[in-house]
Image (tube, coloured by chain):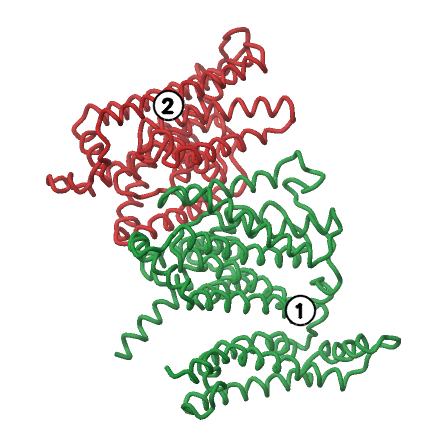
Chain colours: A green, B red
Amino acid sequence: MSAARVERARNSGALSFSILMLYVALPYGVAALTGTPEPNLGALAAWHSAAESVYCEEGLTPVTVILMVETLSMIVAALLARRSGDRWGALGVALRRDGGHLLAVMLLIGLPFLISWQTESSVCTRGRAFYWESVLIDAFILAILAISYNLLFGFTGVVSFGHALFFGLGAYIVGLLMKHLGAPWWLAILAALMGGVLIALVKGVVGLRIKGLYFALFTLAFAQVFFLLAGNRLMVNITGAEDGFTFKVPDWLNTTQNRFFFYLATLAVLVLAFVVVRRLMNSPTGRVLSALRDNESRAQMLGYNTFYFKLISIVLAGVLAALAGVLRGVALKGASPGVLSIDFTITPLIMVIIGGVGTFIGPVLGAFLIHLTEEALRDTVITIGTLSVNIGERWALILGLLFILIVLVFPRGIVGSVQAWWGRSKR
Amino acid sequence: MTTTTPPALRSTTLRQSLIVSGLFVVGLLVINFVFFPPSTVVTVVLSGLYQGMLFFLVASGMSIVFGLLDVLNLAQGAFFMIGAYAGFAIYGTLPESVSLEVRFVAALVGATVFGGLVGLAVEVGLLRPLYARPVFQIVLTFGLASAINEIVRAIYGPAGLIPIDPPAFLDTTLAIAGGRFETYRVFIIAVGLILMVGISLLLQRTRLGIVIRAGVQDREMVEALGINVRRVFTLVFMLGTAVAALGGMTAAPFLGAYPGMGTDFLLTAVIVIVIGGMSSYEGTAIASILVGLTRATAEQISLQYLNTPILASVSILIFMIVVLLVRPSGLFGKE
């Protein structure tokens, strides 16, 4: 690769980011200029309120139209870029490499507006679009959790059965600090992430003394400590014991008032998590991580201190999971011991396995697929002969059986299997 | 895995571990006598022993199975639960006219056989295809545990079943050192001890036991001698799940049956195995008693002074972490 090409490849990430920013800024600007603000507001607030008035309209709004036009031009540009060769420079590289992903993010940004158009409801108040936003927020949070679990399990080969610990920790720390110490939101979030780092370090330093599968057992028991602590009656005034607690969040983070903003924020964190993991795995550190997954003794023999590399992976996965937990806590404005329970270890595990272990997009796809299917089939009852099954009630069972089937038959998951099939048919 | 440790050295470390365990028990007893009157101490010890025996029934299968073929069966807790529910089902199906004693024995035998059969099905149907991908075996058993949990929930509902009546001669109380205790606890301890000795005899005195022990030491060598380790493994896996199911049924008159019981016992069994040292049978046996006693002592202290049983679970977790820091391979594990 020539120096200029390397430079272009390096710029392409920033370029993709700029495209995305432009994509969001354009409809916002238009809405702010055409909308009618609420009276008696300062310049900036009036500007935002004007934009909001357009965003919150029901049915087909100018915003929806602009977003659709933008998305269509993105499709065209991505297709043209495939044939452009070197003529488009860094832009060509960015579109070729990230075109698909950019398009996916754009569709997700536009999705609430599409739903609002089709169902004649508003993205800001009670209605179909508003409801689906909350479903998608949950899907994004689970996807972040799955991405972090995949970093550990799929890319580094560290088998951990205690991932719920970090998820729950994020929700608990953020909530407890905001509720009892009146901490500002940024401090609470920062503290939750630091808490994730700290606990991950303890888990890694103590746990990695233990070899192989032993470590998996350790993680299972280690996570249980925190589940028990959260549910104990001694601190009932602080944590609310088994019932959990609720807390107040700033208005702009409140999912009942500003859900669409929270939707975008969660999506942004998801994109961030995705980019961070992909960047890491394409870096020299990432190469060592996959090397020690494939053959740890060989990586050691080559002179790498595998302990530190595993620790990096555990800490980063812990922080990402804590971030997902923070979002969950803020979205629900509360936390209960359920977020620390073994369920939130099994869920990302199933999502990763079904989506595709050790692939970048697999965990995200798995999370979306599972969560949205569950939501769609909530009230469906299937009757076979005399046996009638309520899908919503038996979802965990169906998922468990599906999981066993996938492990046995398609161990590479959806994305892995498709990639293998694609590779074979190309050859 | 080969061990190059000479036998003499191995027995020294074994003796050290035994001494440490003995001192630990003495320490627990001292703590007990400092805090409680003698009658309470007897309750605590009995309660510790009966819990320890139940942990042993779940953990022993896991430990031997892991030693043989490096398969970590995280569904072992679920088999414990299956045993309890199977026992309930048999109790319910048999007509009232059959005497309680007969129904009880039928439930014990039935639960054991059912647990063994399900174990056989799981090993042959689900684990065998995965020997090429060991990590997926653990992941599968982990998922299987949650699936079994959901199946039970689907059939019996989320609420637990109230404990079944034990036969009349076990439904009495005993007077020891000025306190009264349920005879059933003693029964559980007896069942546990019988199995502990029985499995030990099986391992030490029979041809199958020799093959198992040799397989734990060096599987490839045993295979080279023309023994089908896979088949032995299937048998051992089945025995392990059967013992866990028996444990579940034994506990049913005491604990009842509820969907989360598998997870509860799995977590404690995991701690027992980590403390005892993986793939060490004697380690698992001793560690289960240590864990049971620790748990009972902490529970009593915690109930008396804090009015909540929280310390019971936390104490054994701390116990595990301390053991791991001092000896990462467990008390009786291979270095």
Q: Which chain carries label 2?
A: B
Give how far across and how far down residue A196 sits, in percent.
Answer: 56, 51
Determine the secondary structure under disc 1. Answer: helix
Q: What residue type is labelled 2?
A: Gly
Whether residue A124 is visible to the viewer of this picture, yes or no, is yes
Give how far across and how far down residue B146 sits, in percent.
Answer: 44, 47
Q: What residue type is labelled 1?
A: Phe
Based on the displayed image, in which of its 4 quarters is residue A237 positioned? top right
Residue marked by disc 2: B192
In front of the other: B8 or A60: B8
Going 50% across and 39% down the picture, which residue do you hit? B260
Residue lying at the far top in this picture: please name it: B178
User: Is A292 on the left or on the right of A390, as rendered?
Assistant: left
Q: In this view, does A90 lie above or below A140?
A: below
Q: In this view, does B171 lie above or below A229?
A: above
**Residues packed near mark 1 inside 10 Å, few (<14), some (14 to 19) or many (20 plus):** many
Q: In this view, does B59 lie above or below A332?
A: above
Going 42% across and 21% down the picture, which residue do you hit? B188
In front of the other: A324 or B128: A324
User: Is B227 on the left or on the right of A96, as rendered?
Assistant: left
Going 53% across and 62% down the picture, which residue do you hit? A144
User: Is B66 on the left or on the right of A252, as rendered?
Assistant: left
Give how far across and how far down residue B257 sits, in percent.
Answer: 48, 34
Residue marked by disc 1: A130
Disc count in the image?
2
Q: In this view, does B301 lie above or below A23?
A: above
Give how far across and how far down residue A248 sits, in percent.
Answer: 74, 54
